[in-house]
Image: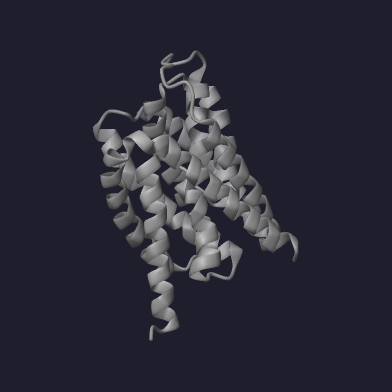
Amino acid sequence: MLSPHTLSALLAIACGSLVGFSLALIGGGGSILAVPLLLYVVGVRDPHLAIGTSAVAVAVNAFANLIPHARAGHVRWKAAFTFAAAGVVGAFCGSTVGKLVDGHRLLVLFAVLMLVVAALMLRGRRGGGVNAYPHAHMFPRLGAVGFAAGGLSGFFGIGGGFLIVPGLMFASGMEIIAAIGTSLFSVGAFATTTAVNYAASGLIDWPVAAEFIGGGILGGWLGAMGAHRLAKTRGTLHVLFALAIIAVAVFMLFENLRR
């Protein structure tokens, strides 16, 4: 019979694999599930501890996925540094405020955010053929949008790619593939800022974070393999994944509103 510690470790690896698999397979949205998985499957009891721990995993995953995009020339570095610099300030402010909010109230807001993410996934990304890069007055716009996206990312402890990708396209005019590649730099920077802020308050479970990251690497490898074989069903996978996010969000709302 497995000990509670061994079972928790296996669950963390399995949940990390699920997040990594979904990210590699459908290209986004997976990190939004990290917090609820840590809370309701792995058994992390404190919502703030779950947010801090997930931020570590999101940061590592983002920087790992940045490498192939950079090699393919999909990263617009000047825009990436400008957006991330402003966003890091926002992420620090957002994560500082997030630590002060009651954990269950924070989870209610998190569930509402999940519903927004699901709606955006069902709607789908648009503007794949747009390429007006660089926009006039691009850098001030990148700074303003980056600060706002970083603030939300830090407050909820998520990667925020669903905000960053359209934000980069709006502020700079870059095409969607460049926005996806460029966004990973900001996702990693925001999550790292959040993780450092939470770590300063002792709100990271480092063993669980390591297990989650290890599972994410394995899941990402499997998802990348499956992505080629399931390319024709990618739209269906997006719908199914969005519906799963909605189900988890409704469960979180029910669990936390009744308290």
The answer, for residue 13, to whether it is visible in the render is yes
Relative to the observer, which residue lies in front, 83 or 55? 55
34 relative to 1 in the view: left or right:
right
Which residue occupies the extreme bottom position in the image? 1
In the image, is residue 100 above or below residue 151? Answer: below
134 relative to 256 in the view: left or right:
left
Q: Quadrant of residue 40?
A: bottom right
The answer, for residue 200, to whether it is visible in the render is no
Colour treatment of the image: one colour
Relative to the observer, which residue lies in front, 125 or 122? 122
In the image, is residue 156 above or below residue 11? Answer: above
Where in the figure is residue 116, as x and y percent of width and height?
A: 61, 40
Where in the figure is residue 220, as x and y percent of width and height?
A: 32, 50
Which residue occupies the extreme right position in the image? 258
Tell me the residue at 53%/50% (across/down): 244
90 relative to 53 in the view: left or right:
right
Tell me the residue at 39%/64% (across/down): 14
In the image, is residue 52 above or below residue 232? Answer: below
Where in the figure is residue 257, as x and y percent of width and height?
A: 74, 60
The quarter of the rendered structure image containing the N terminus is bottom left
The number of discs equals 0
Tell me the residue at 41%/25% (across/down): 176
The quarter of the rendered structure image containing the C terminus is bottom right
Where in the figure is residue 25, as x and y percent of width and height?
A: 36, 44
